[in-house]
């Protein structure tokens, strides 16, 4: 039994007003959601510190949030990570590990690197270079001669508000030939973990986190702007590609379908409370590519039928083309969906979110190729190109459609 009977003509264009209306509402709702209440941006875009912890015993999100808040951090974002074997949470705060300019100058003086440094005897204690990591969790100091690590430790201990990370090898001689010393500081991630161990209990909070990440607000803003530019460039170049490969009247439909898919996926993710991060941007760019590929396949059949079905209206020709491609489109999309659903069901973390975005995108991409791109192309052909479909004798569509698989 065939999925779609040979020669069956489906009237897709008959519901174009309903589909265009539904798509317009979906896009409008997505735009509203982007501004209010707005997406839940990840650390990638808004900056901050993120710690992933596998707790030793059961703990609730409320307990974690209370412990972090009462330790002087801003309102944290606590997210449960699906894991059948462990109790895992992501804890995010807006604070990042930074060393103020005044503290940097103070440390440089204590390391005898500044011109007006005070007690710097013996001569070998003088530093020639002091570098601070962007994350504020590490200082690298280069000395003129072989350094005294005990002296370096005592100098750093005198700096108020800058705490060294506990450990037997801190500071550590990183390069004996260059007399380079590395000093590890407690970052916001370490402070988060200490706060949870102090308030929740050392029997439930481990000594080490599974993962610690941070990004500054400026870097996050740059990543956000770069992501938007990437999507915009993709849309522009796809429009040029479609216009060159097919005809200028085909390009707007493909681009509108892409924008429809990208905005709709974003709106649905906001409704579902999912985090928007670089993984989401990668998923949206993948969806844009998939949507274009699906649209190009249908456009190819329309172009073929423009020569074969002479005399058919463009309206009828599109119905014939979609009917011919419908089985192939659904089977192709279904195969992709099976793989994505497996990733969604058994994946974790970013992989699960990536798969979810693609599942939504594949459905919307298939829908928009049929119900957004082609109706708009037909309208443009009728409105501005004089209806190029109506060129030959009547009745051709019925004869031809019975011969196609």
Image (tube, rainbow, N blue to C red):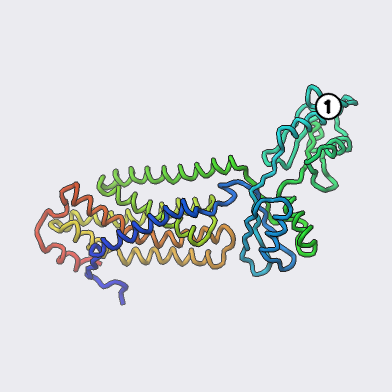
Residue displayed at 58% across by 40% down: 218
How many numbered callouts?
1
Residue at numbered disc 1: 126
Closest to the observer: 161 or 83? 161
Name the quarter where the N terminus is drawn: bottom left
Q: Is residue 98 left or right of residue 30?
A: right
Q: Is residue 294 left or right of residue 124?
A: left
Residue displayed at 76% across by 62% down: 200
Name the quarter where the C terminus is drawn: bottom left
Q: Is residue 401 left or right of residue 124?
A: left
Vertical placement of residue 175 versus 251, above or below: above
Q: Position of residue 182 (x, y in %)?
A: 78, 38
Identify the residue at the far right of this view.
Answer: 122
Residue displayed at 71% across by 68% down: 58
Q: Is residue 367 left or right of residue 106?
A: left
Q: Position of residue 174 (x, y in %)?
A: 79, 38
Q: Position of residue 128 (x, y in %)?
A: 78, 26
Q: Residues within 10 Å of mark 1 (few under 14, many from 20)?
A: many
Q: Secondary structure at mark 1?
A: loop
Q: Position of residue 154 (x, y in %)?
A: 87, 37
Among the 4 quarters of the image, the one containing residue 264: bottom left
Residue displayed at 79% across by 62% down: 201
Vertical placement of residue 59 versus 390, above or below: below
Among the 4 quarters of the image, the one containing residue 240: top left
Closest to the observer: 178 or 89? 89
Vertical placement of residue 101 versus 15, above or below: above
Identify the residue at the far bottom of this view.
Answer: 1
Closest to the observer: 162 or 329? 162
Identify the residue at the far top of this view.
Answer: 115
């Amino acid at each position: 039994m065939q999925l779609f009977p040979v020669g069956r003509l489906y009237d897709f264009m008959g519901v174009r007003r309903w589909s265009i209306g539904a798509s317009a509402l979906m896009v409008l709702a997505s735009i509203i959601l982007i501004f209010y209440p707005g997406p839940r941006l990840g650390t990638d875009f808004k900056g901050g510190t993120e710690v992933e912890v596998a707790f030793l015993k059961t703990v609730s999100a409320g307990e974690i949030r209370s412990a972090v808040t009462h330790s002087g951090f801003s309102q944290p974002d606590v997210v449960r990570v699906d894991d059948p074997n462990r109790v895992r949470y992501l804890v995010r705060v807006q604070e990042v590990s930074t060393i103020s300019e005044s503290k940097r100058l103070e440390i440089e003086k204590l390391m005898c690197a500044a011109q007006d440094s005070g007690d710097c005897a013996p001569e070998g204690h003088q530093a020639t270079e002091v570098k601070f990591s962007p994350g504020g969790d590490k200082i690298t100091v280069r000395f003129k001669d072989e350094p005294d690590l005990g002296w370096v430790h005592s100098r750093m201990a005198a700096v108020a508000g800058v705490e060294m990370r506990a450990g037997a090898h801190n500071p550590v001689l990183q390069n004996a030939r260059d007399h380079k010393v590395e000093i590890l500081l407690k970052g916001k991630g370490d402070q988060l973990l200490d706060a949870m161990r102090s308030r929740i209990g050392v029997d439930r909070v481990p000594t080490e986190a599974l993962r610690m990440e941070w990004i500054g607000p400026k870097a996050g803003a740059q990543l956000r702007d770069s992501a938007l530019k990437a999507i915009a460039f993709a849309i522009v170049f796809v429009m040029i590609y479609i216009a060159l490969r097919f005809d200028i009247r085909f390009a707007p439909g493909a681009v509108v379908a892409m924008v429809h898919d990208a905005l709709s996926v974003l709106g649905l993710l906001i409704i579902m409370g999912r985090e928007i991060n670089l993984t989401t941007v990668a998923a949206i760019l993948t969806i844009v590519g998939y949507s274009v590929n699906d649209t190009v396949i249908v456009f190819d059949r329309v172009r073929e039928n423009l020569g074969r079905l002479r005399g058919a209206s463009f309206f009828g020709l599109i119905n014939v083309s979609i009917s011919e491609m419908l089985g192939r489109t659904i089977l192709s999309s279904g195969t992709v969906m099976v793989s994505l659903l497996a990733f969604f069901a058994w994946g974790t973390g970013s992989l699960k979110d990536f798969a979810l975005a693609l599942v939504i995108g594949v459905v919307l991409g298939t829908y928009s190729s049929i119900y957004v791109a082609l109706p708009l192309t037909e309208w443009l052909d009728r409105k501005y190109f004089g209806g190029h479909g109506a060129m030959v004798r009547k009745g051709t569509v019925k004869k031809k459609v019975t011969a196609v698989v």
